[in-house]
Structure formats: structure tokens, C-alpha cells
Image (spheres, rainbow, N blue to C red):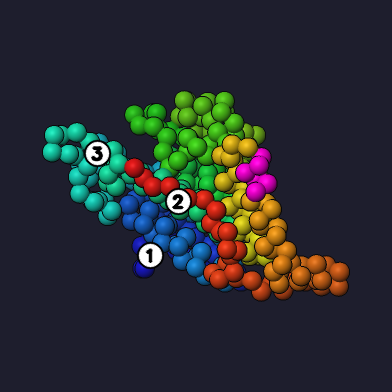
């Protein structure tokens, strides 16, 4: 797939995806949605990719939805430029079929794809991250912000509501009270407030942002088994919604049993004992354990 709104660059096992509409502050479009989904599909299928960084070109990370359609911006039925348009959700009696594919939120489709990702994902927030520019980051694993970064869950100020599955992700990341404060007020806030509220893990000078993100990605890529990382990512995220610790025990047990017999576990132990770097050989593309995935795929309906 040829990318028009993002760039895709792999260097030494680290993939950097850059939102690349700097003249529009990397505003989100339907094309960007499709390209991001494709990029994460490609990354999961490529064993050379061991960690992913997402950032923005120019002075913004993503300033939210592209508002060039004016009042029709969020009126999906009135938009003829949606690249994923799949007919009308209107039934013959004039009602809306809420399960119709064309009702789906584009930001949510991106968030769900990132949630499914098998590689660690780091967000390097270089500037304004507003609306979908911040909600698309919530299913990413670690967020590092430049001092220049600004965040805003501005939906209520635009007459809409939070999207991109943020009603699931945001309270889990920052707690329900902080999530409600930020979404109720819709105000734009600083990187420091994001740090204090638990939205980001670190704030650094602008010139240090990408080096800091790459150093973290490098530590992960150089030292950890890819299959173990893939399992750990899905275990941690999916257990956020588990009903009982037994759900975690069940998956932990299967995972430890399967990985303990794999070549990676033997290499991990022996490399430690022999005081040398580990050389993990199991691949995400072909060596995931037979119990994976352990969940039933959810359908939009």
C-alpha cells in the first residue's frame, strides 16, 4: 500500500510510523485511518519489527479530525469523501441500523487495531495531540511527551462525544475522575499536567524526544524475546477487563508452560548464566503457542 498521510521507516528492528500531514498539523482523515491500520498489519507480519514508535511530522502530533468539511465533518451520512463508505445504514422504514459498518467510528477502528498489535508501541508526542490525536494513543503502551506537547479531549466542545474506544481506555489509564474532568471540560492541557495525571510516563525537551523513545525501543528490541513480548502485551491489556484473577492465572499458566519448553526460554537462561547477550530465535509469525489467541474475536454489531 502506498502511503500518502504517514511514513513507515524501519531501522535496526525499530519501526517509526510518522503521521505526515504537517501542513494540516497531521489532522486525521479516512485515508490516514486506512493507512495506519495497514501499517500495523504490516508490522505484525514482519519479524524484523520488534518495537514501534508513533510520532508526528512538524510541530504537531495530530490536531484531531480534519475539519475541512465544515459542519459535515462528523455527519458521516452526509460525507461523500469517506474512503470506507459502505452504503447507507438507513433501513427502508427510515430507521438507522446501528450495526451497519458505515456507522463505525474511524478512530475506533485504529484503536482496535493497535489494541490487537503484537509488538510494543511507544508514542512520542512532539506537539498538539487533540481529539483523535490523543485518543488514538490510548491503546499504545508507553507515551513520552515533549515539553511542547499539548493534549485535549475536546469532543464535548465540538458537540460530539469521546471516540476511538477512549471510554474504555482512558479511565483504565488515568482513573475515572481524571478521565471525566478532562472529557467534561474539553480543555487543552500541558504535557506536565498529562504527566501528573498519568497519561504520559515522561516529559523531555523537544530535541530529546525521539532519542528517548528510540532508547526505550532499543532496550526492548535488544533484550527481550519477541514471542514473549507479544504474549505479554496481550495478557496485560486483556486482563484489564477480566472478571477474576483466575482468568489471569489460566492464561499465565498456559503461557509459562508453553514458553518454558521453547528454545527462547533455554536461551534466556543460558545467556544469563554465561553472561552474554541472548539470541532469541522464536518468531511471532510462526511460533505463537497453540492456545493463542485465547479470546473470541468481538464483532461490531
268 horizontally vs 283: left or right: right
- Badge count: 3
Q: Main secondary structure of the magenta part?
A: helix
Give the secondary structure at mark 2: loop
Q: Is residue 128 magenta?
A: no
Q: Which residue is mark 3?
A: 97
Q: Earlier in the sequence, mark 1 or mark 2?
A: 1
Between 160 and 293, which is closer to the camera in this rendering? 293
Give the secondary structure at mark 1: loop
The structure residue drawn at horizontal position 50% and vertical position 54%, both measured from the top left corner, is 116
> Can the viewer see residue 111 in this picture?
yes
Between 59 and 166, which is closer to the camera in this rendering? 166
The quadrant of the image that shows the N terminus is bottom left
> Crowdedness of circle 2 by 10 Å Cα count: few (<14), some, many (20+)?
few
Q: Earlier in the sequence, mark 3 or mark 2?
A: 3
Against 10, residue 213 (above or below) is above
The quadrant of the image that shows the C terminus is top left
- Disc 3 from disc 2: Cα separation: 21 Å
Residue 167, percent from left and from top: 47, 35
> Can the viewer see residue 222 in this picture?
no
- Disc 3 from disc 1: Cα separation: 32 Å
Residue 32, percent from left and from top: 37, 55
Q: Which residue is mark 2?
A: 297
- Disc 1 from disc 2: Cα separation: 28 Å
Find the magenta span and give its range. Answer: 245-250
> Crowdedness of circle 3 by 10 Å Cα count: few (<14), some, many (20+)?
some
Which quadrant of the structure image shows residue 178?
Answer: top right
Against 301, residue 30 (above or below) is below
Give the secondary structure at mark 3: loop
Q: Which residue is mark 1?
A: 3
Amino acid at each position: 500500500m502506498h502511503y500518502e498521510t504517514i511514513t513507515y521507516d524501519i531501522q535496526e528492528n525499530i519501526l517509526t510510523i510518522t503521521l505526515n500531514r504537517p501542513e494540516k498539523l497531521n489532522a486525521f482523515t479516512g485515508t490516514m485511518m486506512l493507512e495506519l491500520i495497514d501499517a500495523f498489519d504490516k508490522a505484525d507480519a514482519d519479524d524484523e519489527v520488534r518495537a514501534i514508535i508513533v510520532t508526528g511530522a512538524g510541530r504537531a502530533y495530530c490536531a484531531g479530525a480534519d475539519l475541512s468539511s465544515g459542519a459535515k465533518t462528523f455527519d458521516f451520512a452526509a460525507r461523500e469523501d469517506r474512503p470506507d463508505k459502505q452504503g447507507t445504514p438507513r433501513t427502508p422504514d427510515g430507521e438507522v441500523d446501528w450495526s451497519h459498518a458505515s456507522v463505525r467510528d474511524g478512530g475506533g477502528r485504529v484503536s482496535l487495531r493497535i489494541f490487537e498489535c503484537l509488538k510494543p508501541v511507544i508514542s512520542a508526542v512532539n506537539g498538539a495531540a487533540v481529539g483523535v490525536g490523543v485518543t488514538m494513543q490510548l491503546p499504545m503502551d508507553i507515551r513520552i511527551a515533549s515539553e511542547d506537547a499539548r493534549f485535549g479531549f475536546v469532543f464535548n466542545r465540538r458537540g460530539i462525544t469521546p471516540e476511538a474506544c477512549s471510554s474504555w481506555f482512558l479511565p483504565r489509564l488515568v482513573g475515572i475522575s481524571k478521565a471525566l474532568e478532562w472529557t467534561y471540560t474539553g480543555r487543552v492541557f500541558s504535557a506536565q499536567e498529562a504527566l501528573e495525571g498519568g497519561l504520559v510516563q515522561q516529559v523531555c525537551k523537544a530535541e530529546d524526544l525521539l532519542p528517548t523513545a528510540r532508547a526505550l525501543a532499543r532496550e526492548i528490541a535488544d533484550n527481550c524475546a519477541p514471542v514473549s513480548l507479544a504474549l505479554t502485551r496481550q495478557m496485560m491489556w486483556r486482563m484489564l477487563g477480566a472478571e477474576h484473577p483466575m482468568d489471569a492465572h489460566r492464561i499465565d499458566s498456559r503461557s509459562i508452560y508453553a514458553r518454558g519448553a521453547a528454545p527462547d526460554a533455554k536461551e534466556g537462561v543460558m545467556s544469563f548464566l554465561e553472561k552474554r547477550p541472548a539470541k532469541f530465535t522464536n518468531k511471532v509469525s510462526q511460533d505463537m503457542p497453540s492456545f493463542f489467541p485465547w479470546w473470541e474475536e468481538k464483532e461490531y454489531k
